[in-house]
Amino acid sequence: MARDCSLHIHMDDKSGRLEDSVCVNGVSILRPLKGLDWNLFENLESTCRQRYPKFEILFSVAEEGDQALGVIDELKQKYPKVPIKVIIGDEKVGVNPKVNNLMRPYKQASYDILWVLDSNVIMEPGALARAVDALLSQRGDKPIGLVHHVPFAVTYDHMGLGNRVEEAFLNTNHARMYLAINTVAIESCVTGKSCMYRRSDLERVNASMQPAPPPLAPSEESTIGIGERDGYGMQAFGRFMAEDALIGQAVWHELGKRHDLSCDVAQNVLAKMSFMDYVWRRVRWIRVRKNMVLAATLAEPFTESIVVGLYGAWAVRHLTGGVPMWLTLLVHFSCWLAVDLDVYTSLAGNPVPRNAQMRFFQAWCIRELCALPIWVVAIFGNTIEWRGNLYGMMKNGEAKPLERRATRNVGGRNGVLYEAVPSAGP
């Protein structure tokens, strides 16, 4: 599962930085923020520490009083030579608050190559250079249109059960499937923790998943501002909850370009969450996927260890006429756990620490046992909650804002019961 992490453009062996004399492509790093995420200073600092000679950082917040602005001020004082822009105020182009927060930095970025990073992500100092190197390469006879990174959860000992189960999920099951799908590469599979693509490519797509027309002539481009072509570019993805996945699909299907999975991981620093926070987070994204790729979502239970183990054990007993199911299941789960631990080790660079092995094993077992019940709950609903707001999922992954109305036992979360009703707004 090891990946080639070599950099094909020349680096200064003494400093570890790319030589300034090399003709490199500039990169605009976009980091949309909202509030004080866990470990926020270190997350954002990792962007300032990139070993690359030509980049800028655009931090964006929707409101003037956002607490993240104080953290940005500290970064600017610590890294005065790093070109940092702060953009306050979003642009409403759809229901997705992340896309709304990205619109202004998307338009104001100085460079064509954009690297969009979530606020809870830490990247190694050489990740930017390696990602650019990958973006400028080809996959077979297809050019690379998007570079992304495997999310790898980072949590702390004092955090609760929800964090440990989320860590076990992201660093084993999710990572295994993510790596496998992107290795086979027969379809787009992208999460938006860390994505790099060209703005000029995004300006040509409109989320229709139909082949895009040829690029506009220079004379036509000069009459249309960046991000101003109606229904194209970043604004086209504001109506979706999973804008990252849809951008990946648009680059794949509309432009005919391919993706590359960089050798670096996106270290995803988890905020403190309860077990029920974990459950509802998984429900949310299963419901989003259900409205985007129904067939794949319906097949998900058949990729889970318990379902695979049960029908595998039954098949072995039926074919052999005597091997007990418990023995087959014991071998099956031992092998499954061994593979998941190997995935973890490959991404982390080291095994699960000895003092955390029992906690990790307990969280892994809980994740495996809860996967099917969570899927069942998710598959029979279309309402999701994201950052305190309620949305109704619709066809193709589009979403509609909903408002809450307190009621009796209709359904709820965290002890508060609600009924979703259509919003009066547009």
Image (cartoon, grey):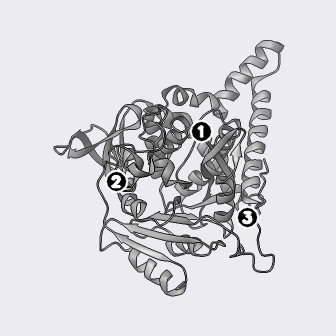
For badge 1, the amino acid type reads Leu
Cα distance in 3D space between marks 2 and 3:
62 Å
For badge 3, the amino acid type reads Asn
Q: Is residue 346 above or below residue 242?
A: below
Q: What secondary structure is found at the residue carrying circle 2?
A: loop
Q: What secondary structure is found at the residue carrying circle 1?
A: helix
Which residue is located at x 38 percent, y 49 percent?
A: 220
x, y (%) of residue 366? 60, 45
Q: 408 or 273, which lies in front? A: 273
Q: Earlier in the sequence, mark 2 or mark 1?
A: 2
Location of mark 2 (residue)? 223
Q: Is residue 76 above or below residue 188?
A: below
- Residue 13, quarter of picture: bottom right
Cα distance in 3D space between marks 2 and 1:
57 Å
x, y (%) of residue 256? 57, 37
Q: Residues within 10 Å of mark 1 (few under 14, many from 20)?
A: some
Q: 351 or 423, which lies in front? A: 423
Location of mark 1 (residue)? 369
Location of mark 3 (residue)? 355
Q: Is residue 387 visible?
A: no
Q: What secondary structure is found at the residue carrying circle 3?
A: helix
Q: Earlier in the sequence, mark 2 or mark 3?
A: 2
x, y (%) of residue 288? 44, 39
